[in-house]
Image (tube, grey):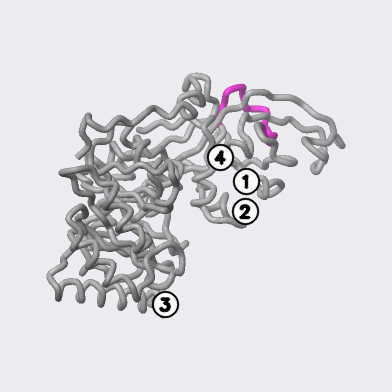
Amino acid sequence: MYTKKHKYTKNKTIKNNKINKNQNMITATINIDAIRKNIKYIKQQSKTDMIPVLKANAYGHGMVEIAKILRKENIELIGVATLEEALILRRGGDKGKILYWVYDLYNPNFKLYPDLDISIIDENHIEILSKMVPKNKKCNIHLFVDTGINRAGIPYEYALSAAKKINDNPKLNLVGMMSHLIESEFKNDKLVNEQLRKFRLLRNQLADINIIPKYVHIANSGGVINYDVSDFTHCRPGKLLHGLNPNKTINNNLNLTMTLSTNIIQLKNINKGDGIGYDYTYFAPKNMRIAVAPIGFADFLPRLSSGKLYVYINGTKRKVLGLESMDQIVIASKKTDKLHDKVIIFGDGKNCPQNINNIAKEASTISTELLTHIGYRVNREYI
């Protein structure tokens, strides 16, 4: 539990980058009820408890506010990727259990916060960490096992011995074991099935020597949807929390949580043959009315979607003309459009036919990459 003894210094960079919300011209609207419905569905599907992952600013949805929503839904443990992300939650007032993955204990600037759960990716970290734990304190450890993805993690063949070392260390509590799936968006995948087999075997080997971690978690969002993980204690969803289906198919049980919108800041007429924007990649085929909106690739928009992107104004689909700029886009307008009319970039599938997955497809990327690139000029509101 977080106590007043630990001082989490305000991040001056973040503080100085704050913009008056009333001056922001782009809004990401996050639907709280949709998040609640997704939590219920995740638990029903996995038949486990959950450790929601709020890394990368909760996939662009705002980690501090999303954490507040989760705590009200009785979520005990929240996961993040880095120590700095964990500290951002603390600065935001979160006093619950937080788990972060340790990447570099050899960094001389690393500081241990014993009230934060840590996942260990290197067997050599065990001794280093134990020396950092203050007198009369213990640190909660999750053993991060590499079951085949070959990224950060303790190699599988050393995981059992590492678990024993942690369990025998008086400064450390082995409270969890975890791993990460390779291609869980595919059902009955050979590689994933082998990972699950190895993870279960390790769990059973630990149980045989009376090591039974409280948190046993391997299933990411795809694992929840496509595999039976009910014999584990927790799942670890990220994108699924926000209604993003890892299967890339329609799932009526999921609810997209974000709508991104801005407003028209200028309307003007141009003549046939006039070029628009940088490099004149678009020429008006006739006399046209155009609208300008204050959003660009510095805020969210993938520049690769230039020439293919559409938005919605007053319920109708409109083409974005020419190259997207850092701060602006130009849109085909209608006579009925007015200054300050809302421009919806993507919606939740109900308030607008276009969603984040459509934008990602046009940019030849994935929705989570785009969402995590939402810039600080975007105001987030929670309804």
Q: Residues within 10 Å of mark 1 (few under 14, many from 20)?
A: many
Residue placed under numbered mark 1 in the picture: 302
* First reached walking from the N terminus: tag 2 or tag 3: 3
Q: Secondary structure at mark 2?
A: helix
Q: Secondary structure at mark 1?
A: loop
Residue placed under numbered mark 2 in the picture: 362
Q: Residues within 10 Å of mark 4 (few under 14, many from 20)?
A: many
Q: Secondary structure at mark 4?
A: strand
State yes or no: discs 1 and 3 in contact (Cβ < 8 Å). no
Quadrant the N terminus occupies: top left
**Residue type, label 3:** Leu
**Residue type, label 2:** Glu
Q: Secondary structure at mark 3?
A: helix
Residue placed under numbered mark 3 in the picture: 191
Asked if residue 123 lies left or right of residue 333, the reply is left
* First reached walking from the N terminus: tag 4 or tag 1: 1
Discs 1/3, front:
3
Q: State the extent of the magenta-drawn residues as a range.
A: 328-342
